Structures are given as C-alpha cells and as structure tokens.
Image (cartoon, rainbow, N blue to C red):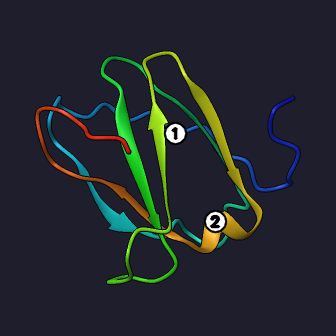
Amino acid sequence: GILTGANRITHVKWYRFGKGIPDHVDREEIDQAAILTLGAGCVVEFRRRLGDCVAARLRVRPGDLYVMSGEVREYVHGIQDGQSDTFG
C-alpha cells in the first residue's frame, strides 16, 4: 500500500473553495499522511518553523495524491486563503 507505518489514519475533510488551512504541524502520533485532493487545486506551503520564510511550495491539482512522511512531517504547513493560488 501507499502507507507502511504502524500509525495510519483515514481522515476525510472538505474545505470550501478559497478557504485556506492555517499553518500547523500534524500530530506526532501520525507518522505518515496520504492526502488526496478533490475539487479545486491549491498550493501547500512548508516552513521549518512558524514564522519562517517558505522553504518549499507544492502545487496540488484536483485528483493528485501526495504522501507526507519523514522529516517533512516536522515542517509547519498550510494553505493560504484566496480565490486563486500562485505558484512560482
């Protein structure tokens, strides 16, 4: 399967178009996360710590599946509010 860790979770959330997800770090007990994007695409921003400059951006399109594991799980990540996303 996609996820191989012992601490796996299935979590489905629906977010309104244009509504972001505040910067956060996922719970420590979840060692891997697979995210399937339905509906609109977005840009996920990753920072080493809250308040830091953006370290990386991930452009996600409808239907994309991405997995977060390892060191990136310690990064602060979120999606900015807005009706359109900028990548670059």
Amino acid type, mark 1:
His
Kind of residue indicated by mark 2: Arg
- Mark 2 or 1: in front is 2
Q: Image quadrant of residue 39?
A: top left
Alpha-carbon distance for marks 2 and 1? 16 Å
Is residue 42 or residue 17 the one in the foreground? Answer: 42
Q: Nearer the viewer, residue 31 or 37?
A: 37
Q: Which quadrant: the C terminus?
A: top left
Q: Position of residue 20 (x, y in %)?
A: 22, 47
Disc 2, SS: helix
Would you say 4 lies left or right of 33 here?
right
Which residue appears at 44% of the width and 23% of the height? 61
Q: Which residue is mark 1?
A: 11
Q: Residue at x 43, y 18 (%)?
A: 62
Report the side of 66 relative to 86 (left or right): right
Q: On the image, numbered disc 2 is attached to which residue?
A: 73
Question: Are dots 2 and 1 in contact, CB under 8 Å?
Answer: no
Q: Residue 63's x, y, as percent?
A: 51, 15
Q: Residue at x 61, y 27 (%)?
A: 65
> Quarter of the image holding residue 35?
top right
Q: Quadrant of the N terminus?
A: top right
Residue 23 image point, x, y percent: 33, 66
